[in-house]
Structure formats: C-alpha cells, structure tokens
Image: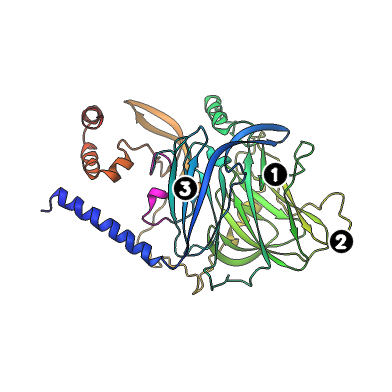
Amino acid sequence: MMGLTKMRFLLEMLVPALLTGMLASMAEGRTHYYDFVLKESKFTRLCSTKSMMTVHGSFPGPVIRIHRGDMVYVNVHNQDDFGATIHWHGVKQTRNPWSDGPDHITQCRIQPGSNFTYNVIFGEDQEGTLWWHAHSDWTRASVHGAIVILPTEGTTYPFPKPDGEHLLVLASWFKGDLNDEYEEFLSNQTETTVLDDIAFTINGEPGDLVACDGETTHRWLVDYGKTYLLRIVNAVVNSELFFAISEHNLTIVGTDGAYTKPRVTSYIMIAPGQTMDVLITTNQGLSHYYMAARQFATFDPNITEFNNMTATAILQYRGNYAPPDVPSFPTNLPLFHDLDSGLGFLPLLRSLATPEHPVNVPLNITTRMFITASINMVNYTFEGTEVSHLAASLNNITFMDPTSSILLAYYRYWYYIVSLFLCFFDHFLYKLINLVVFEY
Ligand SMILES: [Cu+2]
C-alpha cells in the first residue's frame, strides 16, 4: 500500500505538471497585467455625499479588455481600511479556485496595506462580456467593473462586425454604507421589510429623473446609420432590471460570456450578476433618446417600500439639429410588477450552438433530479440547540461554514485526512482534539 508521504509527494509533483501543461496549451494568447488599487473615495448622488470603496476612485471600476484565449494577472493593492477580495464573475477558472476570490473560502481577505495577485484563467470558449466585483461582505456594491472578451485575433463575431461598441454598467446606490445598513436591517428584520438600494445608476449616474436637481446623466454619443454592440452588466446588489432604449429595438446576441441566437426585442430583463450583449442600429431621427432601467419586482406586491426609481442615460445622435427639451422615454419599458413581461423575456435566450461556437451538453439522460431552490426557514442544530433561520437552500439543505478550514486542507494534506476522520467524532470530542492538535 502506498504510504501517505509518497502519495503526497506524487500529488505535489503531478499537480504542478498538470497545471504547466494546461498553461502551455493556452500559450497562444497574450498575457495582460493590471494593477487595481482599492481605496475610499467621495461621491455625491441624490443630493448627499458619502465615501465608499472603489478601485482607483472610479465607479464603476476599470474595464479588463482582452481577446479570447488571453490570460490576465491582476495585482490588487488594498489602500482601504477594510479587508476585501475580488471575484471574477463567470470566469471559468478551471482547476484554479485559488484565484476565484470568495473570502474565507479560497483565500483570506487582502488586508489593508497589503496586496495579492490573481491569475485569472478564462475558459477557452468564453467570449463576450463578464464582470468582476469585490467579494467581502457587501463591498461589491461599489467595487466592480466589466470584463470584455473580444474574438481571438484573426477571427470575428458570429454577426456582422459592429461599427462601434459601448458599455453600460447598471448598479445600486445606497444612502449610507451598505455594510452598516445590512447590520441594521438584520436587527430590525420583519416579514415586510427589504434591504433596498434607494436608486440605480447607469455608468455611475442615476440620471435626471431622480428627485434631486442637478443630477448628472451618462450620455452615449452615436452616429446615424450605424450598428453598435452594447454590452450591459447588471452589477446591482439584489434586483432584476428591465432596460430599454426609446424608439430603438435591441437584438440580443450574447449573455454571460457566450453568444446566443440573435433575437429582436424592445426591452430586456437582466438578472443581478448577468451580462447581456445587444446590437442596436441607429436609424431613428437625429435626437436625444432615454435609455432607462427600472426594477422587475418579483417579491410580494404588498411590499410597497422598494426602490421604484428609474435610472436613465441618454442616447444622443451626433449632428446639427435642435435637441428636444426632454428626450423621449421608452414606452416599452415594463412596469415594476409586470410578471408576464419579466418571465416572457426568458425564452428569447437561446444558445448559438454553431460549429464555431458549439454547446456540448450530454444528450443521453440517465438520471433525473428534482432540485428545489428556495429561501425558507431552515432548521439546524447550533451549539447543541435546535434553531430555525431564514436561509437559501437547495432541497432544504443550506450552506454551513465547514468545521475544518478549506484553505488548510488544500495546503496541508495531513489536515484534510485528519479532518475527514474527525467528522465521525461527536461535537465535544472534535472540539477538544481541534483545540489540542491544531491550535498551536
Ligand atoms: Cu459574482
């Protein structure tokens, strides 16, 4: 039988060899290096000023722009006074969880005054738009930005090459510090309260429909008769959004770093964390048109206090003309509780599935599983007492912090073996051994 030491030695030799092979197979792409500096910056929105964590003082943060097959290193320097990590949302990171970012799971927080370098490894098939965000408490509300993955050099899009492209990042605006607001929300939680942003922003601006004079608005200047690729990121904390552009149809061509079958629509519904790539043709009269986003409210309609602000930006044609007093508003933007429009949108999303962009899903189904995703009261034992708590669950099984450290299990093979063994002991004995063996 193979000794533990020998097995560990083999593992330690094999894993780097496999990783090196994997990296070599991706070597055709270029490697990009970024430096991100986390720091506090002051922002004034909705007539009040607050300080919040950002990268480089910009909200939204910087764009990572690469070609398919490229590799990215991001050195994150924390000059804030709050520890945080960064997650690369939707990036496949195959066999590379140590750069995935969830704090306390695959890494410790990057402490104030220190830095950490992420090696971001994209899936070979990933192309389109993704995004990155902080992953510690609620820092992602203000610390986020887009990732643009262009076609590999020498290849092109699965649709006529657009004349130009533009990026819109939709985000939440909270009155105070979200971490503080969340603590307060937990202590006052009732069935009819929701923790809600007070407005949404488009590229950092809430637009001129919010109740504060002099609010600034994001403007996108376009030329008549062109087709643009618009990349939309929903970086809001908790809400599905409707989005539409007055008088202009949208052709959906991609979502979450993958292409879709082109579908024409007058509005989109985009979930938090989702990205969507749409084509828009500027074939309307020279003027100013509102681009608008508002919440698709899927919660109990009896809850009347929610973020009902409509965020706006302006699509503005270049040229010599008298601008309208007020841009036209998208009449096709659904109302908050319009369930038919919200759910009716979903069938428009279909994989492209062409020979150049295959979708290789198994077609021979041998086992059918029913999984109920819910947020409900989950019963569990906490320090010997039966408790009931509101939690997200799959088939009524929720996530509990593991009793052994995942990080230690990775870096110290013996810890993994002993932790597994200890699972069979009762709570008290486990605690005792943990104290004696590991607290050194
Ligand atoms: Cu994410």
Identify the residue under disc 1: 205
Q: Residues within 10 Å of mark 1 (few under 14, many from 20)?
A: many
Task: Decide whether the magenta segment is chiefly helix, strand or loop.
Answer: loop
Q: Secondary structure at mark 2?
A: loop
Q: Amino acid at mark 1?
A: Glu
Q: Residues within 10 Å of mark 2 (few under 14, many from 20)?
A: few
Q: CA distance from mark 1 to mark 2?
A: 26 Å
Nearer to the camera, 380 or 239: 239
Q: Quadrant of the C terminus?
A: top left
Identify the residue under disc 3: 75
Q: Amino acid at mark 3?
A: Asn
Q: Secondary structure at mark 1?
A: loop
Q: Is residue 11 left or right of residue 117?
A: left
Identify the residue under disc 2: 320
Question: For the residues carrying marks 1 and 2, which lies nearer the camera in this image?
Answer: 2
Where does residue 19 sit, x and y in percent of width and height?
33, 59
Answer with mark 1 or mark 3, whichever residue precedes in sequence: 3
Q: Secondary structure at mark 3?
A: strand
Answer with mark 2 or mark 3, whichever residue precedes in sequence: 3
